[in-house]
Protein backbone atom coordinates (compact mmCIF):
# COMPACT_ATOMS: atom_id res chain seq x y z
CA UNK A 1 0.00 0.00 0.00
CA UNK A 2 2.84 2.38 0.75
CA UNK A 3 3.89 4.75 -2.00
CA UNK A 4 7.29 4.43 -3.63
CA UNK A 5 9.62 6.98 -2.00
CA UNK A 6 10.41 8.57 -5.36
CA UNK A 7 6.78 9.52 -5.84
CA UNK A 8 6.64 11.17 -2.42
CA UNK A 9 9.81 13.16 -3.13
CA UNK A 10 8.42 14.58 -6.36
CA UNK A 11 5.44 15.95 -4.45
CA UNK A 12 7.66 17.25 -1.65
CA UNK A 13 9.29 19.75 -3.95
CA UNK A 14 5.87 20.92 -5.05
CA UNK A 15 4.51 21.05 -1.52
CA UNK A 16 7.35 23.20 -0.24
CA UNK A 17 6.41 25.85 -2.76
CA UNK A 18 2.69 25.47 -2.24
CA UNK A 19 2.87 25.71 1.52
CA UNK A 20 5.20 28.64 1.95
CA UNK A 21 2.16 30.85 2.43
CA UNK A 22 0.50 28.68 5.10
CA UNK A 23 0.31 30.42 8.45
CA UNK A 24 1.32 28.64 11.63
CA UNK A 25 -0.26 28.91 15.05
CA UNK A 26 1.62 31.19 17.42
CA UNK A 27 4.09 29.22 19.50
CA UNK A 28 4.57 26.38 17.00
CA UNK A 29 7.57 26.12 14.73
CA UNK A 30 9.06 23.85 12.11
CA UNK A 31 11.54 21.36 13.56
CA UNK A 32 10.91 22.24 17.21
CA UNK A 33 12.98 19.17 18.23
CA UNK A 34 15.81 19.91 15.80
CA UNK A 35 18.37 20.24 18.60
CA UNK A 36 16.60 18.71 21.62
CA UNK A 37 15.77 15.42 19.86
CA UNK A 38 17.00 15.33 16.27
CA UNK A 39 15.70 11.75 15.78
CA UNK A 40 12.13 12.60 16.89
CA UNK A 41 10.41 13.02 13.53
CA UNK A 42 12.34 10.17 11.84
CA UNK A 43 11.49 7.83 14.69
CA UNK A 44 7.77 8.59 14.46
CA UNK A 45 7.87 8.23 10.69
CA UNK A 46 9.64 4.87 10.76
CA UNK A 47 7.28 3.37 13.31
CA UNK A 48 4.17 4.74 11.57
CA UNK A 49 5.38 3.53 8.18
CA UNK A 50 5.97 0.05 9.61
CA UNK A 51 2.52 -0.03 11.20
CA UNK A 52 0.84 1.00 7.96
CA UNK A 53 2.83 -1.60 6.04
CA UNK A 54 1.46 -4.21 8.47
CA UNK A 55 -2.08 -2.85 8.48
CA UNK A 56 -2.91 -0.38 5.69
CA UNK A 57 -6.02 0.83 7.57
CA UNK A 58 -3.90 2.42 10.32
CA UNK A 59 -3.21 5.66 8.44
CA UNK A 60 -6.86 6.62 8.72
CA UNK A 61 -6.87 5.76 12.42
CA UNK A 62 -4.03 8.24 13.15
CA UNK A 63 -5.57 11.01 11.03
CA UNK A 64 -8.90 10.66 12.78
CA UNK A 65 -7.31 10.59 16.25
CA UNK A 66 -5.57 13.87 15.43
CA UNK A 67 -8.86 15.44 14.28
CA UNK A 68 -10.62 14.34 17.46
CA UNK A 69 -7.75 15.57 19.60
CA UNK A 70 -7.70 19.02 17.99
CA UNK A 71 -11.48 19.50 18.00
CA UNK A 72 -11.79 18.88 21.74
CA UNK A 73 -9.83 21.34 23.95
CA UNK A 74 -7.25 21.86 21.22
CA UNK A 75 -4.39 19.63 20.04
CA UNK A 76 -3.22 18.73 23.54
CA UNK A 77 -3.34 14.90 23.51
CA UNK A 78 -6.43 15.00 25.76
CA UNK A 79 -7.95 12.30 23.55
CA UNK A 80 -5.20 9.88 24.60
CA UNK A 81 -5.80 9.94 28.39
CA UNK A 82 -7.17 6.78 29.97
CA UNK A 83 -9.86 7.14 32.64
CA UNK A 84 -8.64 7.20 36.25
CA UNK A 85 -10.41 6.93 39.59
CA UNK A 86 -10.46 10.70 39.98
CA UNK A 87 -11.40 11.24 36.32
CA UNK A 88 -13.42 8.23 35.16
CA UNK A 89 -14.98 10.05 32.17
CA UNK A 90 -12.19 11.02 29.77
CA UNK A 91 -12.76 11.82 26.08
CA UNK A 92 -11.83 8.33 24.96
CA UNK A 93 -14.70 6.79 26.95
CA UNK A 94 -17.25 8.35 24.58
CA UNK A 95 -16.52 7.51 20.94
CA UNK A 96 -14.57 4.37 20.02
CA UNK A 97 -11.53 5.35 17.96
CA UNK A 98 -8.80 3.10 16.62
CA UNK A 99 -5.08 3.45 17.23
CA UNK A 100 -4.57 4.18 20.94
CA UNK A 101 -2.23 1.23 21.46
CA UNK A 102 -0.37 2.17 18.31
CA UNK A 103 0.21 5.74 19.59
CA UNK A 104 1.50 4.34 22.89
CA UNK A 105 3.97 2.24 20.89
CA UNK A 106 5.16 5.22 18.88
CA UNK A 107 5.65 7.15 22.11
CA UNK A 108 7.69 4.26 23.57
CA UNK A 109 9.94 4.30 20.50
CA UNK A 110 10.44 8.06 20.84
CA UNK A 111 11.11 7.78 24.59
CA UNK A 112 13.79 5.21 23.79
CA UNK A 113 15.75 7.82 21.81
CA UNK A 114 14.89 10.95 23.86
CA UNK A 115 13.28 10.59 27.26
CA UNK A 116 10.65 13.17 28.24
CA UNK A 117 11.33 15.57 25.41
CA UNK A 118 8.67 15.01 22.74
CA UNK A 119 5.05 15.66 23.65
CA UNK A 120 2.24 13.24 22.81
CA UNK A 121 0.36 16.07 21.11
CA UNK A 122 3.30 16.49 18.71
CA UNK A 123 3.70 12.73 18.26
CA UNK A 124 0.05 12.55 17.20
CA UNK A 125 0.54 15.47 14.80
CA UNK A 126 3.62 13.81 13.27
CA UNK A 127 1.84 10.44 13.07
CA UNK A 128 -1.07 12.05 11.21
CA UNK A 129 1.33 13.76 8.79
CA UNK A 130 3.29 10.53 8.27
CA UNK A 131 0.04 8.65 7.64
CA UNK A 132 -0.66 11.13 4.87
CA UNK A 133 2.80 10.47 3.42
CA UNK A 134 2.27 6.70 3.57
CA UNK A 135 -1.38 6.59 2.48
CA UNK A 136 -1.66 9.69 0.34
CA UNK A 137 1.80 10.00 -1.19
CA UNK A 138 2.38 13.66 -0.32
CA UNK A 139 4.59 15.20 2.32
CA UNK A 140 4.68 18.49 4.20
CA UNK A 141 6.14 20.13 7.30
CA UNK A 142 4.08 19.74 10.46
CA UNK A 143 4.99 22.49 12.92
CA UNK A 144 5.66 21.34 16.49
CA UNK A 145 6.13 22.56 20.03
CA UNK A 146 2.77 21.51 21.49
CA UNK A 147 2.49 20.61 25.17
CA UNK A 148 0.28 17.87 26.56
CA UNK A 149 -2.71 18.97 28.62
CA UNK A 150 -3.76 17.81 32.06
CA UNK A 151 -7.50 17.49 31.50
CA UNK A 152 -9.80 15.30 29.42
CA UNK A 153 -13.57 15.64 29.79
CA UNK A 154 -16.04 13.28 28.15
CA UNK A 155 -18.86 15.84 27.82
CA UNK A 156 -16.65 18.12 25.73
CA UNK A 157 -16.60 15.49 22.99
CA UNK A 158 -20.30 15.95 22.33
CA UNK A 159 -19.88 19.73 22.15
CA UNK A 160 -16.79 19.61 19.96
CA UNK A 161 -17.10 16.73 17.52
CA UNK A 162 -19.60 17.26 14.68
CA UNK A 163 -22.29 14.66 14.04
CA UNK A 164 -22.41 12.70 10.76
CA UNK A 165 -26.09 13.71 10.63
CA UNK A 166 -25.20 17.43 10.51
CA UNK A 167 -26.39 19.60 7.65
CA UNK A 168 -24.05 22.09 5.94
CA UNK A 169 -24.87 25.09 8.15
CA UNK A 170 -24.29 23.05 11.31
CA UNK A 171 -20.92 21.89 10.00
CA UNK A 172 -19.92 25.43 9.05
CA UNK A 173 -20.88 26.65 12.53
CA UNK A 174 -18.98 23.81 14.21
CA UNK A 175 -15.82 24.46 12.18
CA UNK A 176 -16.12 28.22 12.78
CA UNK A 177 -15.90 27.68 16.55
CA UNK A 178 -12.46 26.13 15.86
CA UNK A 179 -11.36 28.97 13.60
CA UNK A 180 -11.84 26.88 10.49
CA UNK A 181 -13.76 28.10 7.43
CA UNK A 182 -15.85 26.61 4.61
CA UNK A 183 -12.78 25.73 2.57
CA UNK A 184 -11.20 23.94 5.53
CA UNK A 185 -14.41 21.96 5.96
CA UNK A 186 -14.52 20.86 2.35
CA UNK A 187 -10.80 20.18 2.12
CA UNK A 188 -10.55 18.20 5.38
CA UNK A 189 -13.65 16.16 4.60
CA UNK A 190 -11.47 14.57 1.94
CA UNK A 191 -10.11 12.44 4.81
CA UNK A 192 -13.25 10.38 4.28
CA UNK A 193 -11.59 8.99 1.16
CA UNK A 194 -10.02 6.37 3.42
CA UNK A 195 -10.60 4.43 6.60
CA UNK A 196 -13.46 2.67 8.26
CA UNK A 197 -16.92 3.42 9.60
CA UNK A 198 -19.35 1.42 11.67
CA UNK A 199 -22.65 0.63 10.00
CA UNK A 200 -24.64 2.33 12.76
CA UNK A 201 -23.54 5.71 11.37
CA UNK A 202 -24.83 4.73 7.93
CA UNK A 203 -28.06 2.83 8.57
CA UNK A 204 -30.12 5.95 9.36
CA UNK A 205 -29.66 6.84 5.68
CA UNK A 206 -30.67 3.35 4.50
CA UNK A 207 -33.67 2.37 6.66
CA UNK A 208 -36.62 2.49 6.66
CA UNK A 209 -36.16 4.32 3.36
CA UNK A 210 -33.05 5.28 1.44
CA UNK A 211 -31.97 8.92 1.73
CA UNK A 212 -32.88 10.38 -1.68
CA UNK A 213 -29.51 12.19 -1.84
CA UNK A 214 -27.75 8.82 -1.86
CA UNK A 215 -27.00 7.13 -5.19
CA UNK A 216 -29.58 4.31 -5.48
CA UNK A 217 -27.10 1.78 -6.91
CA UNK A 218 -24.64 2.61 -4.14
CA UNK A 219 -27.39 2.34 -1.50
CA UNK A 220 -28.51 -1.08 -2.72
CA UNK A 221 -24.95 -2.42 -2.41
CA UNK A 222 -24.47 -0.74 0.97
CA UNK A 223 -27.63 -2.38 2.36
CA UNK A 224 -26.06 -5.77 1.71
CA UNK A 225 -23.09 -4.80 3.91
CA UNK A 226 -25.08 -2.93 6.56
CA UNK A 227 -28.29 -4.75 7.57
CA UNK A 228 -31.05 -2.92 9.48
CA UNK A 229 -29.75 -2.00 12.96
CA UNK A 230 -32.33 -4.16 14.72
CA UNK A 231 -30.53 -7.16 13.24
CA UNK A 232 -27.48 -6.27 15.30
CA UNK A 233 -25.33 -5.14 12.40
CA UNK A 234 -24.41 -1.72 13.82
CA UNK A 235 -20.85 -2.69 14.65
CA UNK A 236 -19.99 -4.12 11.26
CA UNK A 237 -17.22 -2.08 9.63
CA UNK A 238 -17.62 -0.59 6.19
CA UNK A 239 -15.05 1.33 4.14
CA UNK A 240 -15.54 5.09 3.94
CA UNK A 241 -14.61 4.88 0.27
CA UNK A 242 -16.36 1.97 -1.39
CA UNK A 243 -15.55 3.07 -4.93
CA UNK A 244 -11.73 2.88 -5.12
CA UNK A 245 -8.86 1.77 -2.83
CA UNK A 246 -10.28 2.25 0.72
CA UNK A 247 -6.80 2.70 2.22
CA UNK A 248 -5.63 5.45 -0.10
CA UNK A 249 -6.07 9.05 0.96
CA UNK A 250 -6.99 10.95 -2.18
CA UNK A 251 -9.39 13.39 -3.81
CA UNK A 252 -11.61 10.41 -4.78
CA UNK A 253 -13.87 11.60 -1.95
CA UNK A 254 -15.04 14.52 -4.11
CA UNK A 255 -15.95 12.25 -7.02
CA UNK A 256 -17.90 10.15 -4.53
CA UNK A 257 -19.74 13.21 -3.16
CA UNK A 258 -20.61 14.35 -6.68
CA UNK A 259 -22.03 10.91 -7.54
CA UNK A 260 -23.87 10.39 -4.23
CA UNK A 261 -21.56 7.64 -3.06
CA UNK A 262 -20.54 8.81 0.42
CA UNK A 263 -21.63 7.41 3.77
CA UNK A 264 -22.65 10.42 5.84
CA UNK A 265 -25.18 13.22 5.53
CA UNK A 266 -22.28 15.46 6.63
CA UNK A 267 -20.37 14.45 3.48
CA UNK A 268 -23.26 14.71 1.03
CA UNK A 269 -24.47 18.06 2.39
CA UNK A 270 -21.33 19.75 1.03
CA UNK A 271 -23.33 19.88 -2.24
CA UNK A 272 -26.08 21.91 -0.54
CA UNK A 273 -26.44 25.67 -0.32
CA UNK A 274 -26.78 28.06 2.61
CA UNK A 275 -27.99 31.66 2.54
CA UNK A 276 -24.47 32.89 3.35
CA UNK A 277 -22.30 30.48 1.34
CA UNK A 278 -24.56 29.86 -1.67
CA UNK A 279 -23.16 26.99 -3.70
CA UNK A 280 -19.58 27.76 -2.66
CA UNK A 281 -18.93 24.40 -1.01
CA UNK A 282 -20.44 22.52 -3.97
CA UNK A 283 -18.13 24.45 -6.28
CA UNK A 284 -15.17 23.49 -4.06
CA UNK A 285 -16.19 19.82 -4.29
CA UNK A 286 -16.13 20.10 -8.07
CA UNK A 287 -12.78 21.87 -8.04
CA UNK A 288 -11.13 19.39 -5.64
CA UNK A 289 -12.45 16.50 -7.74
CA UNK A 290 -10.86 17.99 -10.85
CA UNK A 291 -7.52 19.03 -9.30
CA UNK A 292 -5.87 16.30 -7.23
CA UNK A 293 -2.56 18.10 -6.73
CA UNK A 294 -4.27 21.32 -5.65
CA UNK A 295 -6.33 19.32 -3.16
CA UNK A 296 -3.16 17.74 -1.71
CA UNK A 297 -1.66 21.16 -1.10
CA UNK A 298 -4.92 22.42 0.41
CA UNK A 299 -5.28 19.33 2.58
CA UNK A 300 -1.73 19.70 3.89
CA UNK A 301 -2.35 23.37 4.65
CA UNK A 302 -5.64 22.63 6.40
CA UNK A 303 -4.03 19.87 8.49
CA UNK A 304 -1.41 22.37 9.66
CA UNK A 305 -4.18 24.86 10.45
CA UNK A 306 -6.19 22.22 12.32
CA UNK A 307 -2.99 21.27 14.15
CA UNK A 308 -2.79 24.81 15.52
CA UNK A 309 -6.21 24.81 17.22
CA UNK A 310 -5.94 26.01 20.84
CA UNK A 311 -2.45 24.57 21.28
CA UNK A 312 -0.54 24.79 24.56
CA UNK A 313 3.00 26.05 24.00
CA UNK A 314 5.87 27.68 25.88
CA UNK A 315 4.78 28.64 29.39
CA UNK A 316 1.14 27.57 28.95
CA UNK A 317 -0.08 25.07 31.56
CA UNK A 318 1.01 21.74 30.10
CA UNK A 319 3.73 19.12 30.20
CA UNK A 320 5.58 16.53 28.15
CA UNK A 321 4.02 13.28 29.21
CA UNK A 322 6.11 10.23 29.96
CA UNK A 323 3.38 8.00 28.56
CA UNK A 324 0.56 9.15 26.33
CA UNK A 325 -2.26 7.47 28.25
CA UNK A 326 -1.65 9.25 31.59
CA UNK A 327 -0.54 12.62 32.92
CA UNK A 328 2.79 12.59 34.75
CA UNK A 329 1.22 12.84 38.19
CA UNK A 330 -1.49 10.42 36.96
CA UNK A 331 -4.33 12.40 38.55
C1 LIG B 1 -16.84 17.29 8.96
C2 LIG B 1 -17.28 16.65 10.02
C3 LIG B 1 -16.96 15.22 10.27
C4 LIG B 1 -17.84 14.27 10.66
C5 LIG B 1 -19.31 14.47 10.94
C6 LIG B 1 -17.12 13.02 10.74
C7 LIG B 1 -17.69 11.82 11.11
C8 LIG B 1 -17.06 10.59 11.05
C9 LIG B 1 -17.66 9.33 11.43
C10 LIG B 1 -19.06 9.15 11.99
C11 LIG B 1 -16.75 8.36 11.18
C12 LIG B 1 -16.92 6.85 11.38
C13 LIG B 1 -16.48 6.48 12.77
C14 LIG B 1 -16.68 5.06 13.13
O1 LIG B 1 -17.62 4.41 12.71
O2 LIG B 1 -15.83 4.54 13.92
C15 LIG B 1 -15.56 9.00 10.65
C16 LIG B 1 -14.42 8.35 10.26
C17 LIG B 1 -13.27 8.98 9.90
N1 LIG B 1 -13.07 10.35 9.87
FE1 LIG B 1 -14.45 11.78 10.06
N2 LIG B 1 -15.83 13.23 10.41
C18 LIG B 1 -15.67 14.55 10.11
C19 LIG B 1 -14.50 15.20 9.78
C20 LIG B 1 -13.28 14.57 9.69
C21 LIG B 1 -12.02 15.25 9.58
C22 LIG B 1 -11.84 16.76 9.58
C23 LIG B 1 -11.06 14.29 9.49
C24 LIG B 1 -9.57 14.44 9.37
C25 LIG B 1 -8.98 15.41 8.73
C26 LIG B 1 -11.74 13.01 9.55
C27 LIG B 1 -11.14 11.79 9.41
C28 LIG B 1 -11.78 10.58 9.49
C29 LIG B 1 -11.12 9.32 9.22
C30 LIG B 1 -9.70 9.13 8.72
C31 LIG B 1 -12.05 8.31 9.48
C32 LIG B 1 -11.82 6.81 9.41
C33 LIG B 1 -11.31 6.35 10.76
C34 LIG B 1 -10.87 4.90 10.86
O3 LIG B 1 -10.58 4.28 9.85
O4 LIG B 1 -10.80 4.40 12.00
N3 LIG B 1 -13.08 13.22 9.69
N4 LIG B 1 -15.79 10.36 10.58
C1 LIG C 1 -24.38 6.12 -9.13
O1 LIG C 1 -23.32 5.21 -8.92
C2 LIG C 1 -22.99 4.46 -10.06
C3 LIG C 1 -21.91 3.45 -9.66
O2 LIG C 1 -22.28 2.77 -8.51
C4 LIG C 1 -22.50 5.40 -11.13
O3 LIG C 1 -22.20 4.66 -12.31
C5 LIG C 1 -23.57 6.43 -11.43
O4 LIG C 1 -23.06 7.38 -12.35
C6 LIG C 1 -23.98 7.14 -10.18
N1 LIG C 1 -25.11 8.02 -10.45
C7 LIG C 1 -25.03 9.35 -10.36
C8 LIG C 1 -26.31 10.08 -10.58
O5 LIG C 1 -24.00 9.94 -10.08
C1 LIG D 1 -22.80 27.82 -8.64
O1 LIG D 1 -23.59 28.89 -9.03
C2 LIG D 1 -23.08 29.59 -10.15
C3 LIG D 1 -23.90 30.83 -10.43
O2 LIG D 1 -25.16 30.78 -9.81
C4 LIG D 1 -23.05 28.62 -11.36
O3 LIG D 1 -22.50 29.27 -12.47
C5 LIG D 1 -22.21 27.41 -11.01
O4 LIG D 1 -22.26 26.45 -12.04
C6 LIG D 1 -22.68 26.77 -9.73
N1 LIG D 1 -21.73 25.73 -9.35
C7 LIG D 1 -22.10 24.57 -8.83
C8 LIG D 1 -20.99 23.61 -8.52
O5 LIG D 1 -23.25 24.26 -8.61
Image: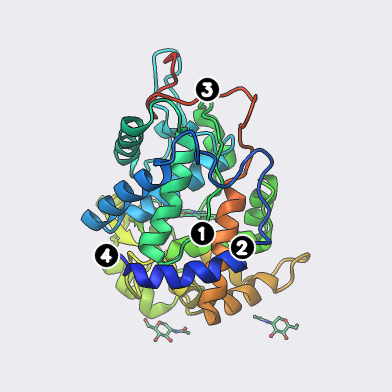
User: Could you tell me which secondary element the residue under label 4 belongs to?
Assistant: helix
Residue placed most toward the observer, 64 or 47: 47
Above or below, comparing residue 118 to residue 284 in the picture: above
Residue placed most toward the observer, 234 or 281: 281
Question: In the rendered structure, are the residues bearing label 1 and label 4 in contact, judged by CB atoms less than 8 Å apart?
Answer: no
Q: Can residue 139 be seen in this view?
A: yes
Q: Is residue 121 left or right of residue 237?
A: right
The image quadrant of residue 210 is bottom left
**Separation (CA) of disc 2 from disc 4:** 40 Å
Residue placed most toward the observer, 194 or 256: 194
Residue 322 spot, x, y in % from top left: 39, 24
Q: Residue 225 carries which label?
A: 4
Residue 276 spot, x, y in % from top left: 78, 64
User: Could you tell me which secondary element the residue under label 2 belongs to?
Assistant: loop
Q: In this view, does 74 lie to the left or right of 192?
A: right
Crowd rating for badge 2 (residues with CA inside 10 Å; few <14, some 14–19, many 20+): some
Count of numbered marks? 4
Question: In the rendered structure, are the residues bearing label 2 and label 1 in contact, judged by CB atoms less than 8 Å apart?
Answer: yes
Which quarter of the figure is the N terminus placed in?
bottom left
* Disc on the earlier residue, 2 or 4: 2
The image quadrant of residue 315 is top right
**Separation (CA) of disc 1 from disc 3:** 29 Å
Question: In the rendered structure, are the residues bearing label 4 and label 3 in contact, judged by CB atoms less than 8 Å apart?
Answer: no
Q: Is residue 166 visible?
A: no
User: Could you tell me which secondary element the residue under label 3 belongs to?
Assistant: loop
- Residue annotated with mark 1: 140
Question: In the rendered structure, are the residues bearing label 1 and label 3 in contact, judged by CB atoms less than 8 Å apart?
Answer: no
Residue 123 spot, x, y in % from top left: 43, 40
Amino acid sequence: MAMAPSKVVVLMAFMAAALSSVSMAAGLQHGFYYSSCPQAEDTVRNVVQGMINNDPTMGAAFVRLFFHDCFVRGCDASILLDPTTSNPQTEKTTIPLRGYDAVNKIKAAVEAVCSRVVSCADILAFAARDSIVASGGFNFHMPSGRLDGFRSIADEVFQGIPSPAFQLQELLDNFATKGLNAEDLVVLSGAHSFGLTHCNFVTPRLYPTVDPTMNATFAAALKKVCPPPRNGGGFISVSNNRVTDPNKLSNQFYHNVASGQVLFTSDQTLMDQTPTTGNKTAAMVTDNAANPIAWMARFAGAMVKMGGIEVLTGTDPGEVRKVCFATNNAS
